[in-house]
Image (cartoon, rainbow, N blue to C red):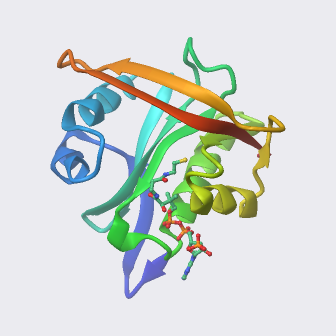
């Protein structure tokens, strides 16, 4: 997507993005852990950027011991002021392209279909279809490198799309 010479692009997050990423949840330590983890082969931490501005981010996971449906997109987030302009769609398409280039034939994403109706209908529009017939309770727990424990529980349904 381009406008007046400026270009919207999906690229790997780097340590210089931390100040921008910190404005969005989760915490700075979680973002920096993800940037570190993405130096390996199991995931990519991606931002969608307009020139030097970071508009949002998403984690693309290829391998993880606790995730059955892979590759998957986790914690997609576009800055509130940039939503509903196609930026999220652009990020998702960018992540799908990266997975396809790596040989993946499918992509998964999880969402709470009732608590996050907008994201759910966006995924449906982009061709994702529910794996389960009804949502299940999903609990997660993550310890960031600063020792802080992050936990959450939400209704969840997995969605799948062929690439
Ligand atoms: C879900 C999320 C990532 C989507 O990002 P987004 O940039 O708003 O997504 P898009 O703009 O591509 O599409 C969303 C909407 O914009 C509309 N849209 C897309 N392109 C558009 C354009 N060029 N002009 C106007 N509207 C457009 C879409 O039709 C869609 O309609 P909706 O408002 O009825 O949902 C974002 O809303 C977000 O960060 N939400 C909070 C975190 C979250 O819930 N993440 C998902 C966890 S599963």
* Vertical placement of residue 57 versus 67, above or below: below
In the displayed structure image, the side of residue 127 where residue 139 appears, left or right: left
Indicate the position of residue 42 as horizontal and vertical percent values.
Answer: 51, 22
Quarter of the rendering containing residue 61 = top right
Residue lying farthest to the right in this orientation: 133
Residue positioned most to the bottom: 4
Q: Position of residue 122 (x, y in %)?
A: 65, 62
**Callout count:** 0
Q: Answer left or right for 150 relative to 22.
A: right
Q: Which residue appears at 30% of the width and 68% of the height? A: 51
114 in relation to 29, above or below: below
| Residue 90 horizontal/vertical position (percent) | 54, 63
Quadrant of the rendered image containing residue 145: top left
Residue 130, above or below 5: above
Which residue: 62% across, 39% down?
110
In this rendering, position of residue 8 left or right of residue 90: left
**Residue occupying image coordinates x 42% and y 53%:** 77
The residue closer to the viewer here, 48 or 145, is: 145
């Amino acid at each position: 997507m381009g406008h007046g010479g400026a270009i919207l692009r999906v690229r790997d997050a780097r340590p210089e993005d931390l100040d921008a990423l910190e404005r969005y949840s989760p915490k700075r330590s979680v973002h920096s852990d993800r940037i570190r983890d993405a130096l390996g082969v199991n995931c990519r931490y991606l931002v969608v950027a307009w020139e030097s501005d970071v508009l949002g981010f998403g984690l693309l996971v290829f391998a993880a011991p606790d995730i059955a449906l892979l590759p998957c997109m986790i914690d997609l987030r576009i800055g509130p002021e940039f939503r509903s302009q196609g930026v999220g769609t652009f990020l998702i398409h960018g992540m799908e392209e990266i997975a396809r280039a790596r040989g993946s034939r499918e992509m998964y994403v999880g969402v709470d279909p009732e608590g996050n109706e907008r994201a759910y209908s966006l995924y449906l529009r982009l061709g994702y279809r529910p794996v389960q017939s009804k949502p299940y309770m999903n609990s997660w727990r993550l310890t960031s490198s600063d020792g802080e424990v992050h936990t959450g529980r939400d209704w969840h349904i997995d969605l799948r799309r062929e690439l």
